[in-house]
Image (spheres, rainbow, N blue to C red):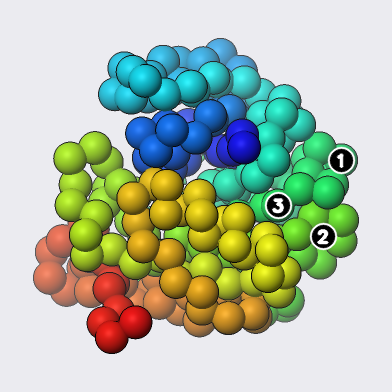
Amino acid sequence: MVAAVIGGTGDLGRAVALRLALGGVPVRLGSRDAARAAAAAKEIAALAPLGDVQGVGNGEAAGAADVCFLCVPDTAQVATLRVLAEPLAGKILVDATVCLAPGDVTQIAPPQEGSAAERAAALLPRTRVIAALQTVAARRLLRGEDLNHVDALVVGDDAEAKAVATGLIERMGVRALDAGPLRNAQTLERLTALILGLNQHYKRRHIAIQFTGV
Ligand SMILES: NC(=O)c1ccc[n+]([C@@H]2O[C@H](COP(=O)([O-])OP(=O)(O)OC[C@H]3O[C@@H](n4cnc5c(N)ncnc54)[C@H](OP(=O)(O)O)[C@@H]3O)[C@@H](O)[C@H]2O)c1
């Protein structure tokens, strides 16, 4: 199974691409600029020498992959997905987008659909949309970080797609928990804002959540 990372040159995209590569998943790292993608892929390949990471344009990445991770700012989500609607048709999209309030990352500014992932699902009726990784800080995924105390919450309305996304996240070394239907992405985005508030309060940069008793 090949995974694409749309927005793979960014903080989260690089981290996801690295962890997928370390987990043995072939990665097509996407960017609006193929040269920028190639440079990022080269950096990741140096950290994961046994991995298969290729940097390409976002469209080529989506077209080549079975599952696409979306890692772009919320302000770029709609435009990015409109451009990628065809290559994403029939595929699984794992959307990490969080609609944070402009000027205050401890609050969210949800779209009228309720969450970024529900907005993606409305835009892409031929794509199975899953929301995940909202609560996982990119820094936490850097090589050498301890992932033993990091949970990723995975939500979606398609059980098979959710199982595939869960499997890929587990390959990244992160425990993935099924947190219910796609509308629960609203809760995930709120949790992100809460975690960012905790980071501010405790002067940290990668506070994570872990559930017990599962
Ligand atoms: N960073 C985290 O720790 C973290 C954790 C959980 C969830 N998230 C969510 O994940 C998403 C990505 O976060 P990030 O921090 O990785 O973002 P970022 O570094 O600011 O941007 C990611 C990439 O998106 C692309 N991009 C930027 N502006 C764009 C535009 N106007 N149109 C199309 N593409 C654009 C850029 O790639 P190119 O210029 O190469 O195309 C950029 O490298 C956000 O929705 C964020 O809320 C982030």
Does any portion of residue 208 appear in the rendered image? yes
Of callouts 3 and 2, which one flags the residue occurring earlier in the amino acid sequence?
3
In the image, residue 80 sits, relative to residue 29, either above or below, namely: below
**Where on the picture, by quarter, is residue 33?**
top right
State how far apart marks 3 and 2 are (Cα).
Answer: 14 Å
Crowd rating for badge 3 (residues with CA inside 10 Å; few <14, some 14–19, many 20+): many
Q: Amino acid at mark 2?
A: Leu
Q: Tell me where residue 109 appears, x and y as whole percent.
A: 55, 74
The front one of 129 and 58 is 129
Quick check: 112 left or right of 169?
right
Specify the farthest residue to the bottom: 213
| Disc 1 secondary structure class | helix
Q: Amino acid at mark 3?
A: Ile
Q: Tell me where residue 65 appears, x and y as whole percent.
A: 68, 35
Of callouts 3 and 1, which one flags the residue occurring earlier in the amino acid sequence?
1
| Disc 2 secondary structure class | helix
State how far apart marks 3 and 1 are (Cα).
Answer: 13 Å
Q: Which residue is mark 3?
A: 92
Q: Nearer the viewer, mark 3 or mark 2?
A: 3
Q: Nearer the viewer, mark 3 or mark 1?
A: 3
State how far apart marks 2 and 1 are (Cα).
Answer: 12 Å
Residue at horizontal 28%, vertical 86%? Answer: 213
Residue at horizontal 21%, vertical 59%? Answer: 148
Does any portion of residue 76 appear in the rendered image? no
Residue at horizontal 18%, vertical 52%? Answer: 146
Q: Which residue is mark 2?
A: 123
Of callouts 2 and 1, which one flags the residue occurring earlier in the amino acid sequence?
1
In the image, residue 153 sits, relative to residue 41, either above or below, namely: below
Q: Quadrant of the C terminus?
A: bottom left
Q: Which residue is mark 1?
A: 86
